[in-house]
Image (cartoon, rainbow, N blue to C red):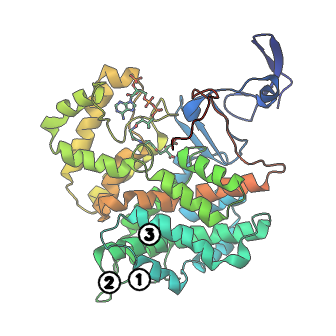
Amino acid sequence: MSDKSATLKAGDIEVELPILEGTEGQPVIDVRALGGKGYFTFDPGFMATGSCESSITFIDGAKGILLHRGFSIEDLARDSDYLEVCHMLLHGDQPTKEEYEEFSKTITRHTMVHEQLNMFFHGFRNDAHPMAMLCGTVGAMSSFYHSDLDVGDPEQRKRSAHRLIAKMPTLVAMCYKYNVGQPFVYPRNDLSYAGNFLNMMFSVPAEDYVISPAVERAMDRIFILHADHEQNASTSTVRLAGSSGANPYACIAAGVASLWGPAHGGANEACLNMLEEIGSVDRIPEFIERAKDKNDPFRLMGFGHRVYKNYDPRATVMRESCHEVLAELDVKNPLLEVAMELERIALSDPYFAEKKLFPNVDFYSGIVLSAIGIPTNMFTCIFALARTVGWISHWHEMMSQPGQKIGRPRQLYTGHSKRDYTPVK
Ligand code: SDX
């Protein structure tokens, strides 16, 4: 913290507002006293608002830096694995070898969902969007754990967190199996987190699915790259839902709903659909012009970011992974050629340079997922699977903070002033 302050003069008031400093990043001006002085701050879209204090993830958008508990995303994507990152995010630090083994065993033993949860799927049409099914089944999970929903109990919060991290791959795979009309595949305790997910996605009763180590590694890396990202829209949604005391399954279902939007987690699906619509390299200029046209709502999906005004460090890692997987699987994905040419043209175009629109994590993840054989409409479910640990870690951090208050923003009211009412009848 700091002893600095900002002086705000407005009308006939003058108020000293404390400036708070963290360990990294921009200081914040604490405006909590302002409400009592007759003013609210106004910041639709939270362009310049810090909503909380957190020690989980740090992003420097100008430098393209992403740290989880101080460890860089580049180091973690190269040398760690998703379960170790989950431990860091949720429990606060890198696990010892013993802690890692214990955590891994705990997660493995929570991967099965209650057998009755299967029935929820049979209420959906089989062509239901997987995100619709995921929203519904995650929220429904709270109905199976009534004895463990005391959000004030740290042990119950941790158990819920472990259940959610463990069961999301099972639920996501069930969404896919329901869409393709194949039987659900039970989780297996002898497989890695990523391997188990791939097996539940692609194994069929007639034959076992052979897990390619390169695909397993790429899947685990995709989970790492999507695990957490500070106070993005879906994480902020989870925090706001949790601030009312809602149970963790309801909060994560709210996060899934928010992530679904094409401006957020839905961008990877939208990006691949865009690449398919572009179809060939010679049509790229037409779409670049549309992206620049203010009168055209079209945007280059997978480009731009609220925070990163430099390359998204995850996109850099994702790009490398993309090439590795395509080489390993000997996949000649024409969409990658379109993607690479689109990236080259966009990055050399002054419009994108001056607006600092760089490829984000969603730009390449769709191509890797497609190469692995995952259908486009499943991409955001994969994102939700990976981001569950980020959501639940922020929820747990918020619920652990003393004096946590319900989130209740105010507004600038521009409607009618009081007026007389005459009953219409
Ligand atoms: C994720 O917040 C997170 O951390 C999110 C995320 C995470 O891990 O949780 O990183 C995951 O959601 C990544 C972003 C995925 N979304 C997309 O790829 C969709 C396409 N991108 C845009 O919709 C947009 O860039 C956003 C939503 C990502 C950011 O929007 P902002 O910060 O509100 O910026 P803006 O819409 O105000 O755009 C600034 C300018 C505008 O031009 P002007 O009005 O100033 O003239 O840049 C233009 C926009 O028109 N612009 C784009 C563009 N993105 C912004 N123009 C063309 N193509 C784009 N993709």
Q: CA distance from mark 2 to mark 3?
A: 16 Å
Residue 172: mark: 3
Residue 267 on image: x %, y %: 38, 47
Task: Report whether residue 168 is seen.
Answer: no
Amino acid type at circle 3 is Val
Examine the rendered structure and indicate whether residue 296 appears above or below residue 369. Answer: above
Q: Which residue is mark 1?
A: 185
Residue 46 on image: x %, y %: 59, 33
Q: Contact, CB < 8 Å: mark 1 with mark 2?
A: yes
Residue 271 on image: x %, y %: 31, 46
Q: Which residue is mark 2?
A: 204
Q: Secondary structure at mark 2?
A: loop
Q: Give residue 49's quadrant in the image.
A: top right
Amino acid type at circle 1 is Val
Residue at 79% of width from left, 63% of height from top?
152
Q: Which sits earlier in the primary sequence, circle 2 or circle 3?
A: 3
- Ligand 1 shows up in the quarter that is top left
Task: Characterize the local packing of mark 1: few (<14), some (14-19) or many (20 or more) Cα atoms within 10 angstroms.
Answer: some
From the viewer's perspective, tell me whether residue 235 is left or right of residue 204. right
Q: CA distance from mark 1 to mark 2?
A: 8 Å
Q: Residue furthest bottom?
A: 206
Q: Secondary structure at mark 1?
A: loop
Task: Report whether residue 58 is seen.
Answer: yes
